[in-house]
Image: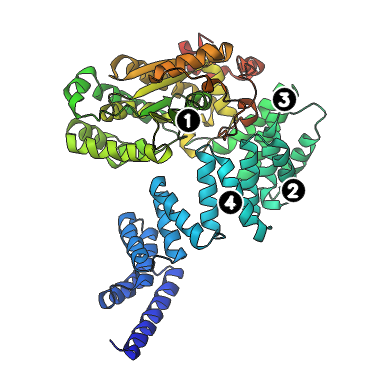
Amino acid sequence: MDIRNELAAAGEAAKAVATATNLLSAGRRAEAKAICQKLLNKYPRDAEAHNLMGVIAISDTRQSEALHHFQTAVSYDPNNVGYLNNLGRLFMRLNRIELAIPVFMRIMKLDPKFASAVTAIAEFFQKMGRADKGLPILDNYLASHPNSPTVIAMKAQALETLGRESEAEAIYLQLERTTDLQAFSLNRLANLRKQKSASPLIDRINQQLRNPSLKPEQSKLLHGAAGKVYEDIGDYDQAFASYAAAAAFDVGGFNIELCQQRYERLMSLFTPQFFRDRRALGHESGLPVLVVGMPRSGTTLTEQIIGRHPDAAGAGELMRLRSMARTLGFKKDISGFIGAMQSVNAEQVRVLAENYLQLLRFYSKSGQRVVDKLPHNFEMLGFASLLFPNMHVIHCRRDAIDTCLSIYVNRFNESHQYANDLTTLGSHYRQYAALMDHWREVLPVSFFESDYEALTDNPDQGARDLIAATGLPWNDACLSHVNAPTTVMTLSVWQVRQPVYKTSVKRWKRFEKHLGPLIEALGDRAEAA
């Protein structure tokens, strides 16, 4: 093709892509797709057309098709940060962090000020416990974009999780003047440290709560912040009223009967005979350490202790086991999953196990143990034990009422809808406890119970017991978790950074008169409290 034909073809393709883009913006996806497909039939190497086809596929939730087009676009134009960004964001959506981060790193080399890459990498470093590596990236971006509230907020959170509270506080005070971030900033200021009775913060929170234009999410943040301050200063009735007001924004949404049926089916499936029949299918690796339990039961502290060992690493809360189970049918109705587990073969197990190990190795290339501390992996223990019969499980337990109270007053995301009212929360705790009783009896893996109260009462011995449970030799570095520079990813950052604390033990006694529905729903599971 001579230069005139090439220019004509380029002009034709650009015009077609522009038309398709306008159609897509107008919501006319089918027409946009038809134009792109016609263009690709004629010019199959047109990177922009492939990229737009990927965008259309995403809007139609056809993620596999989108992945093909984004990867093809990048292969034809490898230095286009827009295409790379679309590919990286799709990897994130697919929960393939180990593939997404190298893409964002590549973008950073091409354009260090590309906002999407900056925030993705900084968030990754923070979640993996190395906010100190993400902080320079944020600072570099803010040097040329100083008025970027979202990035400024990320910097404040990084500083907070690194234990640099004074610097974080200064930024939150600055962000408090930004309308969209005011509720967020006040919430973080309340949680930054224990508040004193003379704190003016509660007045600023209450003033904002009187704002008639607040969005529900902002009101929820402010009520939660008010509850924290009132509890700190000893006004427990007002604190609980504030916590309940925050929870009221999330009422409903959890089917307790369906959850019980799902757990009963898991217990019927995963029996000692199930594991005996399939022992030879599992991967021999002992790399995974699953730290499980209800949220707020000490999983963060446990991961930090183990992660300090020179032969171990913490990977935070990974969704990979759950996402793999979903592909096998682990949904509201788990009939598909049950069938998949009953007919699983060695090749399927190998592929699934290697997928998970690839993710763990992304967090630590040389470690002998890598901790995945997603609390609700307690639902995945049968599946994980099939894949890794040599893995280690640490079950974090805590006073049942204290655990439920802490879950209730800290507003989690929508995947924790069981926490939206006290009765459902107590009932779900009973379901969780029954499932753990089952796992304790049938799992063919190393299984250790870690009691939060015992760990906080004698942290030295508790840490030694945790390391022994992973099969690693003791190392004194495991007791240095409090003063180390790594990130604390938990709702109670300031507490975790104190010497191992007991102030949350029997916390529920402060609110006992308000907890009748919870205690009644817990039944005999609350007796040990």
Query: How far apart are labels 2 and 4 at the CA level?
Result: 21 Å
Q: Quadrant of residue 88?
A: bottom left
* Circle 2 crowding by C-alpha within 10 Å: few under 14, some 14–19, many from 20: some
Q: Amino acid at mark 3?
A: Asp
Front position among marks 2 and 4: 4
Of the image marks 1 and 3, the number of the one nearer the N terminus: 3
Query: How far apart are labels 2 and 3 at the CA level?
Result: 24 Å
Q: Is residue 487 left or right of residue 307?
A: right
User: Can I make out residue 324 in this image?
Assistant: yes
Is 380 located above or below residue 505 in the figure?
below
Mark 2: secondary structure: helix
Front position among marks 2 and 1: 2
Q: Is residue 59 left or right of residue 343?
A: right
Give the numbered dot on residue 137.
4
Query: How far apart are labels 2 and 1 at the CA level?
Result: 35 Å
Q: Amino acid at mark 4?
A: Ile
Which quadrant holds the C terminus? top right
* Residue that mark 2 sits on: 174
Is 498 located above or below residue 217 in the figure?
above
Q: Position of residue 478 (x, y in %)?
A: 52, 22
